[in-house]
Image (spheres, helix red, strand yellow):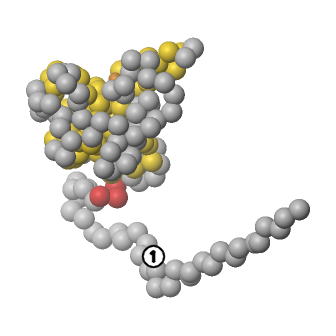
């Protein structure tokens, strides 16, 4: 028999947190570029490309704005072709296929991940080297296109410690 002491978690009241509600400032008609109206693109990163590989994969986290939207295309000057792919597991075999659009519901977060939805870069014009970054433009059905800086992380995680060990086996899909 042993006794597990119950620990009380002390929560700090969020003193001073000020929630400013929607500010409906009068904007010139036809000009609506407020950040919270469109899709936010966060955490854009890519894996370093090994050896002479001419393909790579990049990942982003999308945060839906006030209205539902969808990502319809991606492009980058460093690759001949960039496509949104999704990885599916078919009887233990990873397969990927291009997806025409990725739904970004209002206010929802959509995360691209190794082994899941990813941005496939084909015909790389330069090696993806850890520590470097490159521009990636995301085009949405409704929101204005967004260009983000994609940070290249080392193969298999490393310094940043993220995404080093994903679940499942590789099945020759190490890049995705
Ligand atoms: Cu792919």
Q: Is mark 1 on a helix, strand or loop?
A: loop
State whether residue 143 is above or below residue 121. Answer: below
Task: Give the camera-side residue of 76 and 2.
Answer: 2
Query: What residue did someone put label 1 on?
Result: 19
Please, which residue is most extreme toward the bottom here? 16
- Horizontal side of 28 relative to 10 (left or right) equals left
Observer-nearest residue: 84 or 71? 84
Residue 151 seen anywhere in this rendered image of the structure: yes
Residue at (45% x, 48% y) in the render: 109
Residue 67 location in percent, x, y? Answer: 41, 48
Q: In this view, does 3 lie to the left or right of 81?
A: right
Q: Is residue 92 left or right of residue 64?
A: right
Left or right of 163, for residue 155:
left
Residue occupying the point 21% across, 62% down: 28
The quadrant holding residue 120 is: top left
Residue 66, how many percent across, how many down? Answer: 41, 53
38 or 127: nearer the eye? 127
Q: Residue 130 location in percent, x, y?
A: 21, 42
Quadrant in which the C terminus is drawn = top left
- Kindly tell me whether residue 121 is visible in this rendering: no
């Amino acid at each position: 028999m042993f006794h597990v002491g119950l620990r009380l978690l002390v929560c700090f009241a969020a003193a001073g947190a000020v929630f400013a509600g929607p500010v409906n400032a009068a904007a010139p008609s036809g000009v609506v570029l407020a950040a919270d109206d469109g899709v936010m693109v966060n955490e854009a990163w890519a894996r370093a490309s090994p050896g002479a590989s001419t393909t790579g994969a990049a990942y982003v986290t999308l945060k839906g704005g006030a209205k539902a939207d969808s990502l319809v295309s991606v492009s980058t000057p460093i690759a001949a072709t960039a496509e949104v792919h999704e990885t599916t597991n078919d009887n233990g075999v990873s397969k990927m296929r291009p997806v025409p659009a990725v739904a970004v519901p209002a206010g929802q977060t959509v995360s691209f991940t190794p082994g899941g939805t990813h941005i496939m870069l084909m015909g790389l014009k330069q090696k993806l080297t850890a520590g470097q970054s490159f521009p990636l433009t995301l085009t949405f059905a409704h929101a204005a296109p967004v260009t983000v800086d994609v940070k290249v992380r080392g193969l298999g995680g490393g310094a940043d410690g993220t995404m080093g060990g994903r679940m499942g086996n590789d099945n020759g899909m190490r890049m995705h």
